[in-house]
Image (cartoon, rainbow, N blue to C red):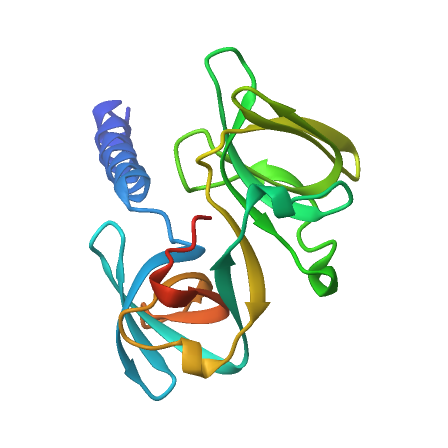
Amino acid sequence: MPVRKSAFVRPLLAITMVAASTLYAIAQKAPTPSRVRGTIERVDGDLLAVKSRSGEDFKLHMTGDTKIAGITKISLADVKVGSFIGTTTVPGPDGSQKAIEVHVFPESMRGTGEGSRPWDLRPKSTMTNATVSESVVGNDGHTLLVKYKGGEKKVVVPDQTPVVTYVPGDRNDVKPGAKLIAFVKQLPDGSFDANRIAVGRDGLTPPM
């Protein structure tokens, strides 16, 4: 007895439509953040309620292993040849890399995250952690040549660029009203473990 082609086509079409719908839903789902930037609204023991810069609410858990640092403002003149820095850059109209923030690591943090990678501060932004090998002062700010394992980058740092450094911190820095950037891992209940927290001192917003 011949089997009608439609007997196979209809189930296959239904499966295809379900799969397509599932893939579309996955594509539309917001990516899980690995960094949270915002303001601490409440502190309840080890749990932080944070309002992100975009208005989202996050619950962050501090653990016994959570590292806490303070962020303070310094001068661009404090960025010396030999300094190990991190800098977020965006492409300029002429193809140069323009810094939108610079943070200087203390000697104890030298080598942290060395290299260059995409960053989520702004569209097309990149984070580069590297050692300053040259510093040239020009009419429109500084130009830094930074070198890291496997590469180097020339970075233009306008005079108004925020420049900060890390200082030792503790849980006394983690208080309502403080601005932070937290490096996080999502838990099954939708909350997050905070592996590292950097808190701005004296109302400072961590620029990275």
Write down the quadrant of residue 60 in the picture.
Answer: bottom left
Q: How many marks?
A: 0
Most foreground residue, 40 or 21: 40
Residue 72, percent across and down?
49, 60
Write down the quadrant of residue 25 in the picture.
Answer: top left
Q: Quadrant of the N terminus?
A: top left
Residue at far bottom of view? 45
From this view, report whether residue 142 is shown above or below residue 115.
Answer: above
From this view, report whether residue 5 is shown above or below residue 63.
Answer: above
Most foreground residue, 2 or 165: 165
Residue 186, percent across and down?
41, 65
Side of 29 where 34 appears, left or right: right
Residue 135, percent across and down?
70, 31
Residue at the spot 25% in from the left edge and 30% down from the top edge: 13
Most foreground residue, 66 or 77: 77
Residue at the spot 38% in from the left edge and 84% down from the top edge: 46
Most foreground residue, 129 or 103: 103
Residue at the spot 30% in from the left edge and 81% down from the top edge: 43
Residue 98, percent across and down?
52, 27
